[in-house]
Image: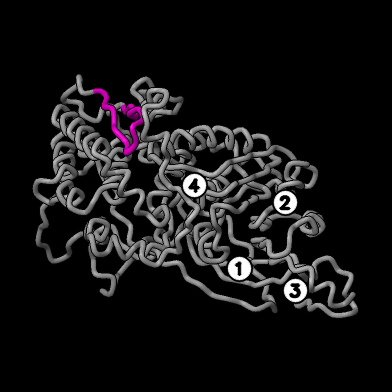
């Protein structure tokens, strides 16, 4: 379960989508296989050897490893337990995303498949993905950021304990990222509760992401060798609770990355990118969210049902598909999110596309968290050596905000998550869309055109006639409030539709 999913109330069900008479397109975003969660040796349960018996007991391991096609015999009590709903944890830490990337985790280091991953992407000639400042000595590479050690620390003994209890002097490490910027500080701790921040997992995932995106294939292959690769040796050190060895290996990683940066390898690889890979994008958004919003996520649950102030998010794989496939956005265009929440979509568009990105939110708590995210996001992008478009986050009612009304005249894509908006607000939004330029697209979860309505002389004066609507289908792991599929709508501003009946 991703962290956005945890924002919904237990037992929440998706709103049913009404049938629409506009033309439809169906698309399914493939989801790659998930890697099994890492279990620290301290938390690992001792393995019991199988004992032959005429009526063997079925352990959790046996059930998980059983062939899916084999018949299962369960008692009524077990059936009831299996079908019962589990309550979501209130402390989300990690984002688990759906993905439209067709590569599995085992394919990331295959040079042929890595090349194929980028071969179908449309090139934006104006997009400069790498950040010159991140690879320079400007300001000494020092800037404000939230280190992992600031959120996962032994100063909070109720939530964290030493990762290497047999080696108490091994308390912290500093991890190098692709850029010339400062290293990130980590305390070597593990969470008492499984849903809290996992330091060793975060370090491993950073290393894996860098290897699969920033290094040439021969260097990546050496680091991921099953016998001698650095990643394998790091895992062995964790398995043996060998703290001193673990720190030495992290230092070896830092030296390796420094060498690839200083000889220009990393910058050359970035220049070959046609776009930012979704896995890398998700890692940056995950780190930003975990160090800001996750710590205060309970504040987002305080909303009033039946009003427009209900919180929900489009997940990154869904928005990525909208930006790249539906809108085909370029870095010289403008993205606007009306009702931007904590700013996830605004940040993603600025990084993934490199465009000018705007958001407006009325809920004060969400605005506060969005500002925290914006600051940390800038630091994270610099760590990863990436440039982003200009980001603007506005507070207040987007119907009244003058900056938003002005930027809408230049907007190319307007995102409106109006799933829970009242009819009155949706009607007001249609009036706001009169300011859009022809060709601008509005992406929404509900259509602004009445069901079954067609442009005719008798309704020629209706404002919604300026919108040419296409209904599409999203599938699971696309939105935060439900796993169920649903519909979304692409409305294109076309003034000629009204002039026809003038």
Secondary structure beneath dot 3 equals loop
Give 308 or 44, whichever is nearer the viewer: 308
Q: Earlier in the sequence, mark 4 or mark 2?
A: 4
What distance separates the C-alpha of mark 4 from that of mark 2? 20 Å
What distance separates the C-alpha of mark 3 from that of mark 2? 26 Å
What distance separates the C-alpha of mark 1 from that of mark 4? 26 Å
Magenta stretch holds residue 187: no
Q: Earlier in the sequence, mark 1 or mark 4?
A: 4
Q: Comparing marks 3 and 2, which lies closer to the viewer?
A: 2
Look at 29% across and 38% down and name the residue there.
Answer: 203
**Residue holding disc 2:** 408
The picture places residue 81, in percent across and down from the top left corner, at 40, 58
**Residue holding disc 4:** 351
Give 215 or 43, whichever is nearer the viewer: 215
Numbered badge on residue 386: none
What distance separates the C-alpha of mark 4 from that of mark 3? 36 Å
The picture places residue 241, in percent across and down from the top left corner, at 16, 33
Q: Quadrant of residue 153?
A: top left
Numbered badge on residue 451: 3
* Labelled pair 3, 1 in contact (Cβ < 8 Å): no
Q: Earlier in the sequence, mark 3 or mark 1?
A: 3
The picture places residue 275, in percent across and down from the top left corner, at 42, 55
- Magenta segment boundaries in residue numbering: 171-186
Look at 56% across and 37% down and name the residue there.
Answer: 298
Magenta stretch holds residue 176: yes
């Amino acid at each position: 379960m991703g962290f956005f999913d945890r924002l919904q109330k237990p037992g929440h069900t998706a709103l049913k989508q009404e049938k629409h008479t506009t033309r439809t397109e169906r698309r399914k975003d493939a989801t790659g296989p998930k890697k099994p969660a890492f279990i620290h040796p301290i938390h690992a349960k001792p393995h019991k050897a199988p004992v032959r018996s005429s009526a063997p007991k079925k352990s959790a391991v046996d059930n998980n490893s059983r062939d899916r096609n084999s018949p299962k015999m369960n008692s009524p009590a077990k059936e009831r337990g299996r079908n019962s709903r589990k309550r979501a944890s209130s402390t989300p830490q990690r984002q688990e995303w759906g993905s439209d990337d067709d590569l599995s985790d085992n394919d990331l280091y295959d040079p042929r498949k890595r090349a194929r991953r980028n071969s179908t992407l449309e090139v934006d000639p104006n997009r400069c993905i790498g950040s010159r400042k991140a690879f320079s000595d400007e300001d000494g590479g020092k800037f404000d950021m939230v280190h992992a050690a600031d959120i996962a620390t032994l100063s909070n003994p109720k939530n964290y304990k030493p990762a290497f209890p047999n080696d108490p002097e091994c308390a912290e490490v500093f991890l190098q990222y692709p850029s010339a910027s400062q290293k990130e500080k980590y305390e070597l701790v593990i969470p008492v509760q499984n849903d809290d921040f996992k330091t060793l997992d975060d370090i491993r995932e950073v290393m894996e992401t860098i290897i699969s995106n920033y290094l040439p294939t021969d260097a990546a292959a050496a680091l991921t060798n099953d016998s001698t690769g650095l990643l394998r040796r790091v895992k062995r050190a964790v398995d043996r609770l060998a703290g001193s060895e673990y720190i030495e290996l992290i230092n070896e990683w830092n030296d390796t990355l420094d060498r690839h940066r200083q000889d220009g390898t990393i910058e050359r690889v970035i220049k070959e990118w046609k776009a930012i890979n979704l896995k890398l994008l998700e890692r940056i958004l995950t780190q930003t969210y975990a160090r800001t919003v996750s710590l205060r996520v309970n504040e987002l649950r305080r909303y009033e049902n039946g009003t427009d102030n209900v919180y929900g998010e489009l997940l990154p794989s869904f928005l990525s598909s909208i930006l790249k496939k539906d809108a085909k956005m370029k870095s010289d265009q403008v993205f606007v999110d009306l009702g931007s929440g904590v700013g996830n979509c605004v940040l993603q568009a600025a990084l993934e596309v490199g465009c000018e990105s705007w958001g407006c939110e009325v809920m004060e708590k969400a605005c506060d968290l969005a500002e925290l995210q914006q600051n940390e996001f800038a630091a994270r992008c610099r760590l990863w050596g990436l440039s982003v478009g200009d980001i603007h986050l506005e507070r207040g009612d987007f119907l009244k905000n003058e900056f938003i009304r002005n930027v809408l005249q230049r907007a190319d894509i307007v995102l409106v998550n109006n799933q829970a908006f009242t009819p009155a607000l949706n009607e007001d939004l249609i009036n706001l869309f009169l300011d859009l330029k022809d060709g601008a697209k509005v992406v929404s979860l509900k259509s602004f055109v009445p069901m079954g309505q067609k442009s005719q002389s008798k309704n020629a004066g209706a404002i919604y006639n300026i919108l040419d609507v296409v209904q599409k289908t999203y599938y699971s792991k696309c939105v935060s409030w439900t796993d169920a599929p649903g519909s979304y709508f692409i409305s294109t501003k076309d003034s000629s539709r009204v002039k026809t009946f003038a």
